[in-house]
Image (spheres, rainbow, N blue to C red):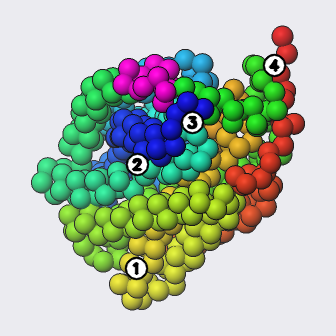
């Protein structure tokens, strides 16, 4: 290889980490802000003004994920065969329009329709950006790269929590949607000027670095597939048992994530009897913990090559803290500490989890595989908030939180049951990658 070890360790990583990760991360932050600002709008006056019950609040929070299904697989395929940059660019325009319109709704049915459309507009984002990361980062770095990108969840939480509390206190819940929607247009300008889909397209990268990336990523694909893979069909992916384990694991994980995320401001308000401004400040700490958790578990996973273990451990920790947040509710600060613990584990498994498809499937198939896993798994994003809303209406908030804890425990068990080939040190089974699309 013509490139020095010094360049491998310094120049190549520095260029990609600084030029590719930030614009992707910022776009993801904006998408998540638009997705979860409803969690603050509900206790901030939306529920009262629009006559929204706990069950309807859960439906409004969860219906996003029904719309989220539609562009998952197309988004992944577009990122593989076309331009993820253009896909996300048009998505930013749609997010802006839908968020502003949400700020002028007059009834709950308009709200449901717009939340559904927002789900459609955001549906392709994650498989697209994960595919773009796979185009730029070899397997040895991919866990950390994924973790930094998926860090949009806690970073968006840190930004959204105080910002939402302040906007609602100073103005009202409608301006929350309008202001955060307009931010999407600002990010659109940054996105179009900075991002590139692949190393071959970037103008700033040296020939030596480009050659290294292209050859390293191609070698990884040959190792996975055992031979060159042409146009492999999605049916080959869906016929794999492990694929369905990943879908089920992601379903139970997303049930916990979004059940927690979309009900956290309401839980904090009732637990502490605080104003929305104070709730916004209290909601920062769980997301600060999430950043620490993501760095810790993704680094440990990359260092050891163990993917299954470092998906399972954060999930069981999340489940335990969820349980303790209810069991310790008589002591406000212990219950709050448990909620912060939930934040620490919130996204810790995610960066590691999304390294697994690249271990199992060729690049040709991995884009579609990520889309299917994210689409069907994110139905948990509908079930979590909606189940909590129903259980609050029928029983109590405690029952809703216990439901989330059970879901996370099931996800942890499924992670342990994944095959050994999911770990980075194991030899992948090429059988699932050798299929070719029928002519």
Q: In the image, residue 383 lies at what x, y percent?
A: 59, 53
Q: Are marks 4 and 3 in contact (CB under 8 Å)?
A: no
Q: In the image, residue 224 lies at what x, y percent?
A: 76, 37
Q: Which residue is mark 1?
A: 337
Sequence order check, earlier mark of 2 and 3: 3
Q: Nearer the viewer, residue 379 or 357?
A: 357
Q: Residues within 10 Å of mark 1 (few under 14, many from 20)?
A: some
For the question of whether residue 416 can be seen, the reply is yes
Q: Which residue is mark 3?
A: 134
Q: Which mark is residue 437?
A: 4
How far apart in space, not on screen, are marks 2 and 3 (Cα)? 17 Å
Sequence order check, earlier mark of 1 and 2: 2
Q: Residues within 10 Å of mark 4 (few under 14, many from 20)?
A: few
Q: In the image, residue 357 lies at what x, y percent?
A: 68, 42
Sequence order check, earlier mark of 4 and 1: 1
How far apart in space, not on screen, are marks 2 and 4 (Cα)? 35 Å
Residue sitting at 77 percent across and 24 percent down? 229
Q: What's the magenta region? A: 197-210
Q: Nearer the viewer, residue 78 or 99?
A: 78
């Amino acid at each position: 290889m013509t490139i020095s070890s010094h360049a491998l360790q310094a120049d190549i990583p520095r260029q990609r980490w600084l030029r590719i990760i930030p614009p992707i991360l910022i776009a993801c932050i904006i998408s998540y802000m638009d997705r979860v600002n409803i969690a603050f709008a509900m206790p901030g006056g939306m529920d009262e003004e629009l006559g929204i019950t706990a069950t309807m609040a859960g439906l409004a929070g969860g219906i996003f994920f029904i719309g989220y299904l539609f562009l998952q697989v197309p988004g992944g395929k577009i990122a593989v065969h076309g331009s993820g940059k253009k896909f996300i660019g048009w998505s930013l325009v749609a997010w802006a329009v839908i968020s502003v319109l949400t700020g002028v709704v007059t009834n709950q049915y308009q709200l449901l329709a717009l939340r559904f459309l927002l789900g459609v507009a955001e549906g392709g984002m994650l498989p697209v950006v994960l595919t773009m990361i796979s185009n730029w980062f070899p397997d040895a770095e991919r866990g950390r790269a994924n973790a930094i990108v998926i860090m949009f969840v806690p970073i968006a939480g840190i930004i959204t929590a105080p910002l939402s509390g302040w906007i609602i206190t100073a103005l009202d819940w409608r301006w929350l949607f309008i202001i955060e929607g307009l931010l999407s247009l600002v990010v659109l300008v940054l996105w179009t000027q900075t991002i590139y889909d692949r190393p071959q397209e970037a103008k700033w990268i040296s020939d030596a670095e480009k050659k290294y990336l292209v050859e390293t990523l191609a070698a990884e694909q040959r190792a996975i597939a055992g031979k060159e893979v042409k146009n492999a069909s999605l049916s080959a992916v869906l016929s794999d048992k492990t694929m369905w384990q990943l879908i089920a694991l992601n379903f139970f994980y997303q049930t916990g994530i979004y059940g927690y995320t979309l009900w956290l401001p309401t839980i904090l308000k009732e637990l502490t009897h605080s104003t929305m401004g104070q709730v916004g400040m209290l909601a920062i700490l769980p997301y600060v913990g999430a950043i620490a958790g993501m760095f810790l578990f993704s680094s440990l996973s990359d260092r050891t090559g163990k993917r299954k273990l470092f998906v399972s451990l954060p999930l069981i920790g999340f489940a335990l803290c969820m349980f303790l947040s209810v069991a310790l509710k008589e002591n406000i600060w212990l219950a709050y500490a448990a909620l912060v613990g939930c934040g620490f584990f919130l996204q810790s498994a995610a960066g590691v989890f999304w390294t697994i498809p690249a271990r199992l499937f060729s690049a040709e198939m991995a884009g579609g595989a990520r889309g299917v896993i994210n689409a069907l798994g994110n139905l948990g994003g509908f079930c979590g908030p909606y189940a909590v809303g129903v259980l609050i209406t029928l029983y109590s908030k405690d029952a809703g939180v216990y439901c989330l804890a059970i879901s996370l425990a099931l996800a942890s068990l499924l992670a342990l049951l994944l095959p050994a080939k999911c770990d980075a040190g194991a030899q992948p089974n090429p059988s699932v990658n050798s299929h070719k699309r029928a002519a």
